Image (tube, rainbow, N blue to C red):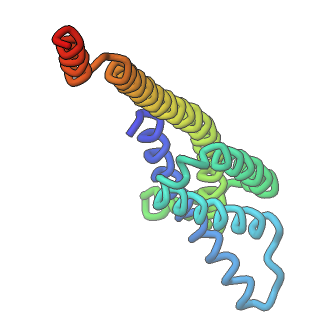
Amino acid sequence: MAISGLLFLSWRIFEIITLIPIMGMLAWFVHQYVQANALTPAYILVLFIVSVIALAWAVFTTIDYLRARHDALFVAFMDLAIVGALIAGVYYLRGIASQNCTSASAYAGDGRLSVNISANKSCTMLKAAFALAIINILAFFVTFLLALLVHRNHRNDDKVVVKREYRSSSHRGTHRSRSRDHRSSRDYNYDNRPSGGSRRSHHSTTRRTAYV
């Protein structure tokens, strides 16, 4: 396996690992809205759909890598399309970046200072999904470049195989033509060379004529 193929598989596994939390956290939000019989907001739904498609594509191309290697150009195109879709999902969820998901409160009592830090679960999950989506934008762009490199290497390998087959076939054809020429030359010499029987018959005829 070439280095480009090994790097491609490594980044694919990394994408799968980081896409699973995105899909899981956003699926929890979708489930909450479905139970409340309410429409899921676009900033959650878009990134959720994109993460599901990206995860399915990453798993498929990892399992079926040998076939994907032959279609590396198509794989690169799909990865670039997923990059665009993830950018759209991050754009819809951009409002969470400015939110403060933790709150701290302090109070003094009995001569002691107590600090209470609480985190908003929904805000934290959305911010984590937002950060992981940005990471996957970079990861899918890297696999896009690696797929192009795999396509170039695989195309060069095909050219080498074709050249070798062409040389072997031409060598066999030359050997066959030489053997045929050699056989034809031997047949020609056998046809034109006077045989021993003809020489003997000629001498016997000469002797008989001289005797008479």
Return the residue nearer the eye: 48 or 25.
Answer: 48
Left or right: 26 as drawn, with respect to 61: right
- x%, y% of residue 201? 22, 21
Above/below status of 22 relative to 33: above
Above/below status of 170 relative to 29: above
Left or right: 170 as drawn, with respect to 29: left
Residue under the image location 45 percent in, 47 percent down: 9
Above/below status of 201 relative to 119: above
**Which of the image's four quarters has the N terminus?**
top left
Q: How many marks?
A: 0
Left or right: 156 as drawn, with respect to 180: right
- x%, y% of residue 94? 77, 52
Q: Residue furthest front?
A: 212
Return the residue nearer the eye: 132 or 160.
Answer: 160
- x%, y% of residue 134? 65, 47
Regarding residue 33, the answer to whether it shows in the image is yes
**Which of the image's four quarters has the C terminus?**
top left
Residue under the image location 58 percent in, 37 percent down: 151
Residue under the image location 58 percent in, 32 percent down: 152
Left or right: 43 as drawn, with respect to 131: right
Above/below status of 212 relative to 23: above
Residue under the image location 55 percent in, 52 percent down: 68
Return the residue nearer the eye: 30 or 173.
Answer: 173
Regarding residue 95, the answer to whether it shows in the image is no
